[in-house]
Image (tube, grey):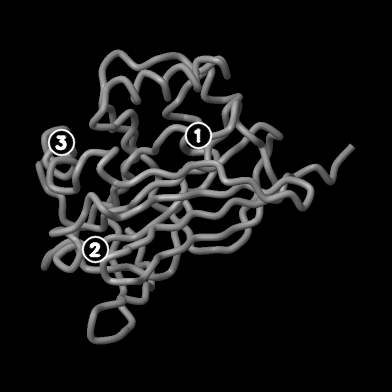
Amino acid sequence: MKTVPFTLETKEGRRGLDFLVRRMVNAGYSGRDQQEVRRHIEELRREGIPAPESTPTLYPVITDLLTLQEEIEVVGDRTSGEAEFVLLVGDEGCLVGVGSDHTDRELETVDITKAKQVCPNVMGPKVWSLDEVEDHWDALVLRSWVSEGGRRTLSQEAALEALLPPRELMAFVRSRLKDGRLEGTVIFSGTVSILTPEIIYGDSFEVELEDPVLGRRLSCRYRVKRLDYLF
């Protein structure tokens, strides 16, 4: 287990909050629109990544791979991020964050679960209470940008009505847990289709979750450093 320090932003203000992580899972192919899910599967298939047997699906991730750092290290040159909302299920309720399931696409062609252990899950430092946003959840907007050589490109943009709602996602995760205990679980939601013709393997990645009703947003930004210092 590990403890991660966040800033809880509420309608009344902000305060520090430490979240104890017991386990972490990444959801995949979790769109409400199955046609859109198939489109995302085709995006990955073009990269040589096999389709799952059923959707949605879950992948366990080592908890130490959860980070708030603004720079990550990767081994390959075919890694990329994915915009995702993140649920942190605590003893007294659920928090909402934003993050990126950064993944080695080359390794995904061999073993997706192992590929999830090669790059970190990156989150932004602020979180909200689910109770404050659940009544207008579908209006929240998820976006991502990828930068390559100084050129910043909008990569993803969709309202959260495109993905499974939080209660349904939590119920799905609980149904797959051997002990049925969600407390202390970090859930990465799965992502939406990209806007570009193909995946851009950039040197930095940004994710934003905008709440247009309450006029606030969560953000996650990080640089990607490839370990290429050896001959």
Q: For the residue marked with disc 2, what is the amino acid? A: Leu
Q: Nearer the viewer, residue 177 or 144?
A: 144
Q: Tell me the residue that label 2 is attached to.
A: 95
Q: Tell me the residue that label 1 is attached to.
A: 194
Residue at screen point 42% across, 29% down: 113
Left or right? Give the position of 62 relative to 175: right
Local packing at callout 1 (Cα closer than 10 Å; few below 14, some 14-19, many 20+) is many
Q: For the residue marked with disc 3, what is the amino acid? A: Phe
* Image quadrant containing the C terminus: top right
Query: Spatial distance from mark 1 to mark 3, Cα to Cα?
Result: 25 Å
Q: Tell me the residue that label 3 is attached to.
A: 172
Dot placed on the residue nearer the N-terminal end, 1 or 2: 2
Residue at screen point 46% across, 63% down: 219
Label 2: element kind: strand
Left or right? Give the position of 224 relative to 38: right
Residue at screen point 13% across, 41% down: 168
Q: Nearer the viewer, residue 175 or 127?
A: 127
Dot placed on the residue nearer the N-terminal end, 2 or 3: 2
Q: Are marks 2 and 3 in contact (CB under 8 Å)?
A: no
Query: Spatial distance from mark 2 to mark 3, Cα to Cα?
Result: 17 Å
Q: For the residue marked with disc 1, what is the amino acid? A: Ile
Dot placed on the residue nearer the N-terminal end, 1 or 3: 3
